[in-house]
Image: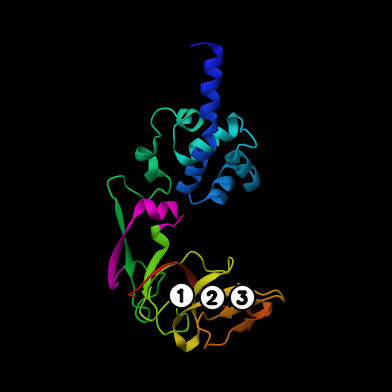
Amino acid sequence: MNTTENIQELTQALAGLGDRISKIADLVGGKKNLARSIGISESQLYRYIAGDSQPTVEPLAAIAKCGNVHLDWLVLGEGPTGISAEINDLKGIYSTKQEYISIPEYKEEDVELENKPVGSLGRLSFNHFWLLKSGLDPQNLRLIRAHGDSMSPTIKDSDLLMIDISQTAFNGDAVYILRLDSNGLVAKRLQQSVDKGLYLVNDNSAYREQHIPDAQKEALDIIGKVVWSAGLL
């Protein structure tokens, strides 16, 4: 094979580098997580993926190590990825022999969600690769049932909610589980207010939104962030 053909093959291989980096980002919970893990800015990672900038050996090695993939596959797209053998090491809690991981469901009035899954109502199994791609750690996940219609149609009465209990502070507009006095646990949408503070929003227009001033934000008892829901149509 002559030099021109070698260059053409290398160029073609590098053309797929961005896609392979993007795939690794999906494996480790997103581009933001990957950029932070390897010590570069998210904008720089996007330039690598778009092909606007070619990474040097150091970031390439860091990306391969973070994704537990072979460097040859990352750079050239050749050989085994290493993913199937190493994927469980990404979070340190998975087994390659365990395709599904069960998440406990709690009865909110009987069990504190922070407790270990003893006395839970039951369990529901989820594909561990899907959880990994979503950046979710099963050890931090709990299932509970929604009550009431204040978040309808997004969340209906008796819908099953998956909660990430590691998210106990406001971290961007999303639906969170709050403990509100005697009302027990409730699902509410929290949104950043343009005039400081937060808005506690109900998706059902029959219920009024509530403004939470900055001085009262710390008093919010956030139990976790809702990351998935399911219910009957």
> For the view shown, which residue lies furthest in the right direction?
195
**Marks 1 and 3 close (CB-CB < 8 Å):** no
Q: Nearer the viewer, residue 82 or 91?
A: 82
Q: Residue at x 38, y 54 (%)?
A: 130
Question: How far across and down, in percent of the image, does residue 29 sit?
Answer: 49, 51
Q: Amino acid at mark 1?
A: Thr
Classify 10 Å Cα crowding around label 1: few (below 14), some (14-19), many (20 and above): some
On the rendered structure, is 6 left or right of 125? right
Spatial CA span between label 2 and label 3: 16 Å
Residue at disc 2, secondary structure:
strand
Question: How far across and down, in percent of the image, does residue 28 sit?
Answer: 47, 48
Q: Residue at x 53, y 38 (%)?
A: 63
Which is in the foreground here, disc 1 or disc 3? 1
Q: Amino acid at mark 2?
A: Arg
Q: Which residue is mark 2?
A: 189
Question: How far across and down, in percent of the image, does residue 114 sit?
Answer: 42, 69
Q: Amino acid at mark 3?
A: Glu
Classify 10 Å Cα crowding around label 2: few (below 14), some (14-19), many (20 and above): many
Spatial CA span between label 1 and label 2: 10 Å
Q: Residue at x 46, y 75 (%)?
A: 154
**Marks 1 and 2 close (CB-CB < 8 Å):** yes
Classify 10 Å Cα crowding around label 3: few (below 14), some (14-19), many (20 and above): few
The stretch in magenta equals 118-137
- The disc placed on residue 195 is none
On the rendered structure, is 163 left or right of 11? left
Q: Nearer the viewer, residue 109 or 16?
A: 16
- The disc placed on residue 218 is 3
Asked where in the image residue 87 lies, by quadrant, the reply is top left
Task: Give the quarter of the figure containing the C terminus.
Answer: bottom left
